Image (tube, grey):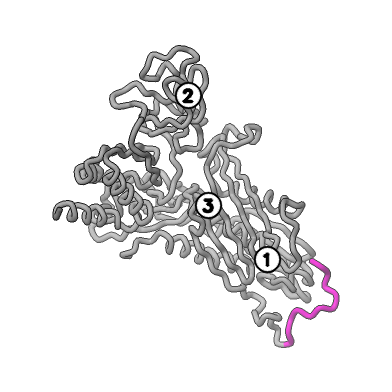
Amino acid sequence: MGGYGDVKLLRDDGKRLDGRTVDEMRPVSIEAGVLPAADGSAMVTHGLNVAVAAVYGPMEAHPRKIQRQDRAVIDVRYNMAPFSTGDRIRPGFNRRSREISKVTAEALESVVLVERYPRSKIRVEIEILAAEAGTRCVGITAAAVALADAGIPMRDMIVGVASGKIEDTVVLDLDKAEDNHGQADLPVGILPNTGEIAFLQMDGDLSIEEFNLAMEYNFKAASEIHVLMVDALKRRYERGDN
Amino acid sequence: MGCPVGGTGEKRMSEGQVGAEQRLVTPGMVIGPSAGKHAGSGAIAQNEEFIATRLGWLNEQNDVVSVRPINSAYMPRSGDLIVGVVAEVRNNLWFFDVNGPFQALLPMSLAPWKVEFGSTRQHLGIGDAALARVQEVDEAHNMVLTMKGIGLRRLNEGCVIAIPVNLIDTLRGDNNSRVSKIRDLTDCRIIVADNGRVWVHGDADNMFTVRGLIQTLVDEGHMNNFEDAVDALEQQRGEN
């Protein structure tokens, strides 16, 4: 949230600057198995965001101090490419990417059946090639498809979605201008089949009613994205004669 | 669906289903009610329903609902025949890369030779391939191999080709029928190990042919093109 000042984000007809309605998502496309060298991979395009996720493992966890005797650890590395935004990003880990890597790992650990692979590590690499607000959600969605593509057992495929508030109006899926000048942002990781929430962050303030409406939008968007995730996996593997 | 667990390719499995379409399931997908049935691999029971935990083809036999994964890592089981590559040598044991998450250990007492302490390198060095069997695996993935047994040996010749573990049954066929057919057609010695490695030995042209067939399986195995490729080879060899 860069502060909301006097930037106008809603048009007079109630629509947003890019013509979307308040509960309309940016266009999403998902492709599974884009990287031949990885055990599983996926590319998600969400509006102008492009995220590629690669999964390797399960493999022996190194260094040994990170091993857990009763379960696998999920090692997530979220990174934004230097050319992903208008201003060049200095390559390498920074405070933000560490935080997003951590919350993504914790979200994925809640769905992956980690107890099946004691002392192992599952490595998830998320690379943001183009960024336009909401990259952590796009990264989580890509990671979930890549994990499924790698054959890692999971209770559900987690979907990353976000809602927020602009000009005192709750809207689904903030774009860059709305993220920078809006009043609140609510990224959530949803398990679409059970309706459970695997991660939730909130930046800015929302009243209880606004929060409930934002979550309603998030659940609606999650079910739409989940259909695309399943479709991407089916497209990759469905038999040619089916 | 009346197909055997660990069947031999989608076409054969579908034939046993009497009109039933094979169903591709994704993690989290509800497979069906759990009443009176048991969850097999790739499925868990939750709220009186079965949930798929892996991406794969749904399989139901003898009241056991399971998912045959499309893509999976090799998880060793006791008794598996494996092709391992020596990754590390100590004075009294070898560590093998077995294409799994963990290395396996071959103590000198389970080697087929009489090995003196400190002379392990004389028998197997780093990078050598060997045919071995899994003696035991514990719950923390500690894995012990044995090379005492008929046919277990160091692999001095031929080549080792890697394939995804889930395609092993497709390559083998019913009672190894398909791999036997490839052996006969190409005059190669072929051993399909359980850890997704195939050892092939024969003359160079035939080994190249087998490699091409296996590549077809790896690239297009889920679409039955492998069976067509084997049939095409059979026809071609029959004409010559």
Specify the amino acid type for callout 3: Leu
Location of the C terminus of chain A (image quadrant): bottom left
The answer for how far apart the CA atoms under marks 2 and 3 are is: 32 Å
| Residue closest to the eye, A52 or B62 | A52
Left/right of residue B33 with respect to residue A183 in the rendered view: left
Left/right of residue B118 with respect to residue A201 in the rendered view: left
Q: What span is in magenta?
A: A1-12
Specify the amino acid type for callout 1: Ala
Check disc 1 and report the residue beneath it: A131
Location of residue A192 in the rendering, given as x and y in whole percent from the top left corner: 55, 60
Sequence-wise, which precedes: disc 1 or disc 3? 1
Q: Secondary structure at mark 1?
A: loop
Q: Residue at x 33, y 26 (%)?
A: B152
Check disc 2 and report the residue beneath it: B94
What's the mark number on residue A147?
3
Q: Residue at x 56, y 49 (%)?
A: A111
| Residue closest to the eye, B92 or B187 | B187
Res. A212 visible in picture:
no
Magenta-drawn stretch contains A3: yes
Location of residue B86 in the rendering, given as x and y in whole percent from the top left corner: 46, 30
Q: Quadrant of residue B206?
A: top left
| Residue closest to the eye, A136 or B194 | B194
Magenta-drawn stretch contains A69: no
Location of residue B95 in the rendering, given as x and y in whole percent from the top left corner: 49, 27
Q: Residue at x 42, y 34 (%)?
A: B76
Left/right of residue A116 with respect to residue A241 in the rendered view: right
View extreme (front): residue: B204
Q: Chain of mark 2?
A: B
Q: Chain of mark 3?
A: A
The answer for how far apart the CA atoms under marks 1 and 3 are is: 22 Å
